[in-house]
Image (spheres, rainbow, N blue to C red):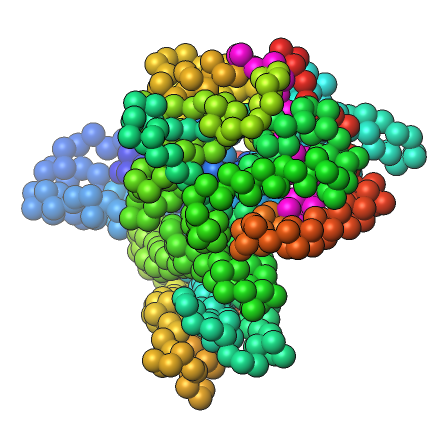
Amino acid sequence: MRSTRRLLRPALACCLLITTALVSAGCSTGQDRTVVVLGPWTDGEEIPFVGMLKEIGRRTGQSYEYEGTRSLRETLSAQLRTKTPPDVAILNGLGELAEYARDGDAKVLADDVAGSALGPWAQQITLEDVTGKRRRHSYWVPVRVDLKSIVWSRPGDLKAAENPRWCLGMASGATSGWPGTDWIEDLLLQKYGANVYEDWATGKLPWTSPQVRSAWQAWRDVLAQDGTKAAEEAISTEFESLGGGRYGLLNSGKCTLEHQGSFIRRHYGDDVLPAPTRTFVPGLPAGPRAFEVSGDMAAVFRPSDAAWDLLRELTSQAARDVWARLAKPEERPLFPDRSTGGGRLSAGTAAVQKLFDAADEICFDASDAMPSTLRGAFQRAVLEFLQDPQDPGLLKKLLEQLEAERLMQDRAGAFALDHLCGDPGD
Amino acid sequence: MNHDDGPRPGPRRPGPGDPGPTGPAPADTRPAEHGGKDSGVRPGARGRRRGPGRALWHWSAGRDAGGALRPTGKFLFSRMVLLPALMFTVLALAGTAYFDVHRRTEELRDRYAPALVDLAHARVSLVLAQQEAEQRLGTGGDDPPPQTALVGLGERYPSLVTKASQSLNNTVQTGALSRAQEQVVRVVSGLVSAYDGWIDWAGSHHDSAPLRRAGMDYAADLLRTGPTAVLQRIDALEKDLRAAVADRGDRHTVLAVTASVALPATLLLVFVFVGLLDFVRAGLRVRGPLLVLYALPVLLVLVVLSSGVAAQQRAQRDVERSVSGIGQITVPRPSGDGTRQAGSSRGPDAAIDRADAALAERLRGTHPDGWARASVLALSVGAAGAVGCGLTLRRYGREHWKIDWGKA
């Protein structure tokens, strides 16, 4: 009897405790602490990066959510307009990033993070602070880079060597036309060198200058090799997708030479290798081995300890090693110090690294360094040019329009970058 | 003497076996079969039948092992604490269960259903916009209509794209999305902006077949091609939200846990209460109508909340069915010559609006706010009843405590 009473009282006390617990549980609210990362990689290219984020998350306890899109500018602009930016955005346009920095959307890097910024990818820009003083700061760090000014081919295919044909595809979602801008930038760099290239990209050289016109005409001559219809067909051809889950224009069987950045090697086997542009484009003068490069730069848009920690992680050797380990050999990322992480490299990756190491000069992608409106105009001008590259009147009209836009951007002080070229060892 | 006026004043004479105010009862060591302990209890058969059930009843009804009443003061004091505590426990458990279900219904009604309606509007608007653009600018190798130079893309196309963008924005405002899902919607908004840019570009080059076709192709790719295209992302998000709706409608964890605790608690409450009534009748010579009056609302609360839970669950199933139906609304393909049939473009939007309105009407019919108010009222009355029980027992036991504690 007494033992029954003894049991009942604690049981009743438990009832009250459970009640309290249930009620308080119902009142508690969870807070979402996910760090959102917006980036350019999609269609499978993002897989090793997302894997790296998961490993960082397991180690730090932080959760990350990656969302990739090729419409980075439109997406980020829309988010900034509604004051809901991602925590971290990874962009490939220095000019665009400079605009965000000027508007106060991209945040100044802490010194320890800024110190890991290297080469032409990491620019300090001068802006006025709230007191009107002009200060130089870093706003982004490169996390991955790519080599350009290269042409991919199958050196072992002798038949293709006898009958070369250029692969050409401009379609790329929101940024269609950029493969053509790469061509013109590269030809300008190879023909006139880094100084002229830099002046043009930073808004000092007019679009109507003889050098710029000559670069467009050089491209016209390259296109003419493949007949009159090839240029027009290129307008609607995808730059990498062949449809049906197949990728890589060199795999189409319709062309043998592809002027494309080093990232394209992920679609190819060891039989496809890069070589400098001048190897395949006749008439380019001898000179320093100059290459265009591009990069993916991370910047913080919604500052928090977690966001800054992520930037530190992305520039750390540990994270790079993970990224490299998770990537297939043919898609191993190149880092700003020109390393690719440990492990076996594909023949294409090894060849790219060798070209990188042998470069005398590297220059950041010119259109990516321009203000975003001018960059977009350049891309669309390329598409219009391809309707009829042989029409001098069309080229004159396009260059005049681009020049008018350059002047407008220059008056607005939109060219924020001073230099884009340097020694690879910088 | 009126039995309804409460207990008669004056000390009660201790009964047999009553331990009294200062010490336990003297132990009766005579074996049960020789008449020990329970005077008047036949040894043998009844001693063997006294099991846990009887012991529990004795505990509930304030009897000692011999069946005599326990000291009134102590018993009433214990019940003055225990009974309201049990009542509040039952009320809290019932309230937790009801308001958990109510909260889920509110989430489904005010967040998930509107989010799915907005996503459906966005999806439909974009498909209609693409059809409109194709009609204005031609598809494949077709030339655009002759009036394109004057009309361009017309008025309908931009309003459809604006509506899609607004619907996407509204989706985020519903609060139904996680941060990651919000980012997906932002990406989709960016893609819609890029899509619109290419359609506009194609329109501005309507007289150049290669550029017009290219612009339309770029736009169509952004809209439809691959898992990262606009419509695919919207579709994936709709699926995720419908799964969340189904999950919320099915997940009854809190309800199951609280019900599994509330049921035994209620049975215990009833058991204790009936035992108390028996004690009060036997020891105080009152039937305890006030106690019954105060206890009744507590039991009625369970009836009210159970009915409310059933109504909420019906509403949740309604939401699930409706959003599933909304997800199946699509845009019909245009006729063979690419022209719109009269009213066909308004059809899907109107169907979404009709489904949304019908759902809202059905949900209003479940009177959710009315049930919530009724539940709060019932719980308040029940709580007042619990307090009333405690106060009544305090009144019953006051004089006994004066005697018991006075002696101490």
Count up the numbered dots.
0
Q: For residue A47: magenta? A: no
Percent position (x, y) of residue B27? Answer: 27, 31
Residue B370 visible in rendering? no
Q: Nearer the viewer, residue A31 or B6?
A: A31
Q: Position of residue A225 (x, y in %)?
A: 46, 41
A11, A109: nearer the viewer:
A109
User: Residue at point 77% right, 50% down?
Assistant: A404
| Residue A33 occupies quadrant | top right
**In the foreground, A148 or B243:** A148
Regarding residue B225, the answer to whether it shows in the image is yes
- The residue that appears at 39% across and 54% down in the rendered structure is B225
**Residue at 70% in and 48% down:** A399
Horizontal side of residue A418 vs A166, given as left or right: right
Tell me residue A386's x, y (percent).
54, 51
Q: Is residue A163 above or below residue B196?
A: above
Give the percent coordinates (x, y) of residue A252: 31, 41
| Left-right relation of A20 to A197 | left
Q: Farthest residue to the left: give it.
A: B45
- In the image, residue A308 sits, relative to residue B387, either above or below, namely above
Which residue occupies 67% across, 27% down?
A192
Does residue A365 belong to the magenta stretch? yes
Residue A359 picture quarter = top right
- The residues colored magenta run A357-378
Q: In front: B48, or A24?
A: A24
Q: Is residue A348 left or right of residue B16?
A: right
Left-right relation of A185 to A332:
right
The residue sitting at the right extreme is A132
Judge whether B61 appears above or below B407 on screen.
below
